[in-house]
Amino acid sequence: MGQIDTIASAGASPADTSAWGEPLIAVEGLTKSYGAFKALENMQFDLRPGEVHVLFGENGAGKSTLIRILFGVQGFDSGSYRLFGEEITHLTPGEARARGISVVFQEFSLIPEMTVEENLFLGHETMRGGRLDKRAMRARARAVLDRLGFDLEPTAKVGQLRRAHQQMVEIAKALVQDCRVLVLDEPTASLTDHEAERLFDLVEQLRGEGLGIVYVSHRMAEIERLADRITVLRDGHYIDTVDGGGTDHQKLVELMTGRSFETFFPEIAHTPGPTVLRFEAVTLASGLARDIDLEIRAGEVLGLAGLAGCGKSEVIRAAFGLETLADGHISHHGQALSRLSPTTALRQGICYFPSDRSTEGLAMGQSLGVNATKAALDEARFSRRGWRLIGRAGRSFTQEAVDRLRIRTPGLKARASQLSGGNKQKLMVARGMSRDFDVFLFDEPTVGVDVQAKLEIYGFIKALTEAGKAVVVCSSELAEVLHLSHRLVVMRDGRIVGELEAEAASEDAVLSLFFHDPGAGTAAAPSDPILQEKRA
């Protein structure tokens, strides 16, 4: 990290960006087109040492295109790009990395079968006498991991790590070589609150060492905490660059969407019907949820809330056959579900949307049609004699889903991997339209998506509920479960600790249950800044 140390020794305050002189990156009038479609037009952006510069905009606004240009993944048509004072006309990712730009993309670039240290040095291995110097690489890997405060074993296989730990490997990989510019694309999408807090500390540490950090996020609490400046994009156009300390949530949303601030959460009619899905004394074999009694009714939204690791996700996974029951049972319309698997759950009319769209939700290399009909493999209109066919019916259904959910795509034959994060999420949601489900289980339905995509997903939830479907929303976003739910169940340490009707489900009431047993007195105010922001 010699370059970092050199910059840091200059002694200028990270907040005083003018003291650093020439920008690390300066973009003027940048334009990038794909045929008639302009992904970027007249883009303006600069990054100075010792600052966190947030890129803010809806999915499809041009943020990813700009990052790919900065990192040499693709070129640009016109305009100028200066990197460390040098005019850039052609750049490859290898050259960008050698010059000191590292990117942590939202979709990881790790090799699961390789160890942590092998991934860290992939493509720039340390050699000695014509052979890999494994001892030197392991020592360097351990030094970087220790410096970052990541509790990872260099010899661990990446494929066996939790997604949050894989993200730590990606960050360490970005910093194992000398780095002057670090790009973080939605870095907290898969992290718990505690892990996110550690990441924020790391970002502040690196800023203090003089790195220029480009940070992409939709989460207001993160932006308010970290941003020195914020550049807003909309539909491929540069809108404005504003000071991070003097711009509120409302102003940013207005800049991003081009419309006045509006209520995010729809009013969902509450017409509760019979119990469709019931948990009775359910304990999971994993031990992550115990003694769960729960009723899921037609015509209402049931919210599941709790801190990360409380067991809420595991509960709805159990209803889809992804968690094994040690005790108790789950019944659907009064009939006990035995030997439950995803296949039988789908046939019973239960649809589940996982929190991790990349690894569990979508087949990234497959087309929109394949992904949209994934939950209806046994439906006669989409298959014949066990063979899957995306014929006229499949194309018609996929077009209907694209239109209804406003999925931005180059075409119906496009692969899921070609879509932005919010459009991937909407594509996953589209499978809920592929057959006659009566139970919809959403696990973190808007993770890593922009405001407009959130509104469209909320609209889908509203339509399902008002059509008499039973809907469960499991979310770490307190505002989301508070505003969408007709009933709210709070979990802690694998158990249900409270159930609130919508009228009684205030922020204070829910946070109290997060941290305190009912009737045990007043809960201490949470120290977590993310929760404090949610309370506000």
Image (cartoon, rainbow, N blue to C red):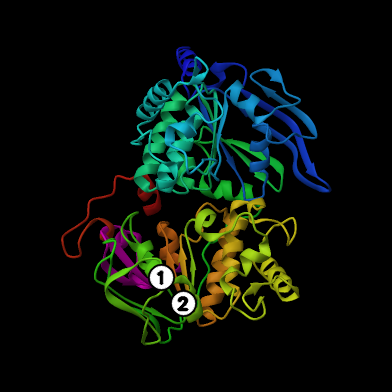
Place of residue 510 in the rendered image (x, y in percent of width and height, measured from the top left):
31, 61
Q: In which quarter of the image is residue 115?
A: top left
Query: Looking at the image, which residue is at 46% across and 77% down?
Result: 344
Residue 281 visible, this angle? no
Q: Type of residue at label 1?
A: Gly
Query: Looking at the image, which residue is at 64% across and 81% down?
Result: 380
How busy is the neighbourhood of tag 1: few (under 14 within 10 Å), some, or many (20 plus)?
some
- Farthest residue toward the left? 520
User: Closest to the observer: 34 or 152?
Assistant: 152
Indicate left or right for 187 with 489 as reference.
right
Residue 81 visible, this angle? yes
Q: Quadrant of residue 201?
A: top left
488 is within the stretch colored magenta: yes
User: Closest to the observer: 516 or 186?
Assistant: 186
Instruction: Label 2: state its secondary structure.
Output: helix
The residue that disc 1 covers is 321
Vertical side of 224 occupied by 275: above or below = below
Dot placed on the residue nearer the N-terminal end, 2 or 1:
1
Indicate left or right for 69 with 271 as reference.
right
Tell whether label 1 touches label 2 (CB within 8 Å): yes
- Farthest residue toward the front? 130
Q: Distance between the residues labelled 2 and 1?
A: 8 Å
Magenta region, residue range: 484-512
Q: Type of residue at label 2?
A: Thr
Query: Looking at the image, which residue is at 56% across and 64% down?
Result: 457
Vertical side of 339 occupied by 56: above or below = above
Place of residue 121 in the rendered image (x, y in percent of width and height, measured from the top left):
50, 28
The residue that disc 2 covers is 344
Place of residue 3 in the rendered image (x, y in percent of width and height, measured from the top left):
51, 16
Instruction: Label 1: state its secondary structure.
Output: loop
